[in-house]
Image (tube, rainbow, N blue to C red):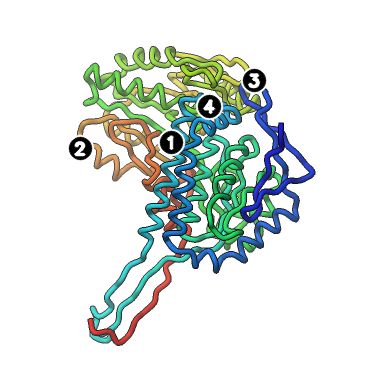
Amino acid sequence: MSVTPFWVAGKPRTGSIVHEVHSPFDGTLVGSHAEPSAADVDEAVQAAVDVQSAALATTAAQRADALMHVSQQITARAEEIAQLITAENGKPLMWSRIEVTRGASTFRWAAEEARRWSGELQRLDTDATSAGRMAVIRRFPNGPVLGIAPFNFPLNLVAHKVAPALAVGAPIIVKPAPATPMTALLLGELLAQTDLPAGMWSVLPLANEQTADLVADPRLPVVSFTGSETVGYHIQASQPTKHVVLELGGNAAAVVLADWSSDADLEWAATRIATFGNYQAGQSCVSVQRVLVDESVYERFVPLLVAKLEALKTGAPTDEDVQVGPVINDAAAARIQSWIDDAVASGATLLAGGTREGTTIAPTLLSDAPAEAKVSCEEVFGPVMTIAPVAGVDAALAAVNDSRFGLQAGIFTHDLQVAFRAHRELVVGGVVIGDVPSFRADQMPYGGVKSSGLGREGLRAAMTDLTHDRVMVLTGLDL
């Protein structure tokens, strides 16, 4: 098997140290890649610094055409990329194919936003002393970006680092997760087919322990990190002068309220909650973790949800009908199993799942879990949910907010007043009405509050986050 190169300033590069990537399901070899040396890393950073003027001088058409090319190539090679994602990440093919579609959409949205990235005009003659003056307000990059991506979406979360940066003309260095670098390296192959200036992007598959110097490098004033809370807040604390964007974790709640009470309503909610508590094997920041059900429908809803969970098929992620694959490694599987066991030992009742086979955890549902149990108050990042009854809207909204996380929440209700109240009162980055908190359209602003992060992704929102206003005042105009 050939060694996949990494990318320095848009050019493929090999090295003397080679790492193998193995499937988290059965350990089979997926591929191997070269590791960048310290000199390679320094060259990539300096190239990002040196290319800034040329990057800013690119036209909107040039940036948009490059981004659209990547989008089209992802679509053209969709099955190949989906198979690669499944091989290195372990998610079932059905979810990998959806990720590929989203990745193509993310680059397409970036291309469209690049063409609209125009700034605004502001009349200043609203005051007599400013007669004849107008402000032209445009946004310019804060500087070269270091994008650090996680393992759970090897294509689309890398896309959410790369696409908005390139759309605004900001050079970017991407560090993919060590467990899943192969998809990001393939993305480098697609970027290399564009006419973006050399140095505008690099893909460096570094080990996590090799990244501290890169994070601290003063030549990279922007760090966009998606991953664990511990690492994210360490980056923020250690780099107080940098612009740091953090997309961290959550323990997302799905709420089924009393008015969501017909058989069809409950069937829909149970299907969606079961599916999106376990998609990506629960390894998503907005995977359903806490299920809160109004006490008036609780007894009807629980057996529906249990049946839906028991119907989910686990197994080899390459099987077309498998819905729940493995978690990323043995250590993660052991941790998740220990959290389930600890909750049961503390008084929780196991309603479904609770078993482990290798790196595969059966879809698990727990009732009566103590508030202090890790499955209740921390991010499981696995196919585990808790369920509890709540007495009305007040109690439901209070329960959602009773968390140090605040990423997204899902509220199953038909009541428009309750929907707007939830939007006002829930301390989260997004409220999804009539569906699970796991819904994300890639063009919408996405991110959290409290311990779930800082800043926003989603193409236009991320482009704004990576840039700053710069004002030009025109004088002596006949307005």
Q: Amino acid at mark 3?
A: Asp
The residue that label 3 is drawn on is: 26
The residue that label 4 is drawn on is: 91
Q: Amino acid at mark 4?
A: Lys
Of badges 4 and 2, the one in the foreground is 4
| Residue shown at the point (40%, 33%) measured from the top left | 438
Disc 1 to disc 2, how far (Cα)?
32 Å
Of badges 2 and 3, the one in the foreground is 3
Residue 72, placed above or below residue 20: below
Tell me if mark 1 has few (under 14), some (14-19) or many (20+) residues whose alpha carbon lies within 10 angstroms of its own: some
Of badges 1 and 4, the one in the foreground is 1
Disc 1 to disc 4, how far (Cα)?
15 Å
Quarter of the picture containing the C terminus is: bottom left
Q: Position of residue 161 (x, y in %)?
A: 51, 49
Disc 4 to disc 3, how far (Cα)?
13 Å
Disc 2 to disc 3, how far (Cα)?
48 Å
Q: Amino acid at mark 1?
A: Thr
Q: Secondary structure at mark 3?
A: loop
Which quadrant of the figure has residue 390? top left
Instruction: State left or right for residue 357 relative to residue 60.
Output: right
Residue 127 visible from this viewpoint: yes
Disc 4 to disc 2, how far (Cα)?
36 Å
The residue that label 2 is drawn on is: 416
Mark nearer the N terminus (2 vs 3): 3
Mark nearer the N terminus (4 vs 3): 3
Quarter of the picture containing the N terminus is: top right
Which quadrant of the figure has residue 150? top right
Q: Position of residue 126 (x, y in %)?
A: 23, 78
The residue that label 1 is drawn on is: 101
Q: Position of residue 193 (x, y in %)?
A: 55, 49
Tell me if mark 4 has few (under 14), some (14-19) or many (20+) residues whose alpha carbon lies within 10 angstroms of its own: many
Mark nearer the N terminus (1 vs 2): 1
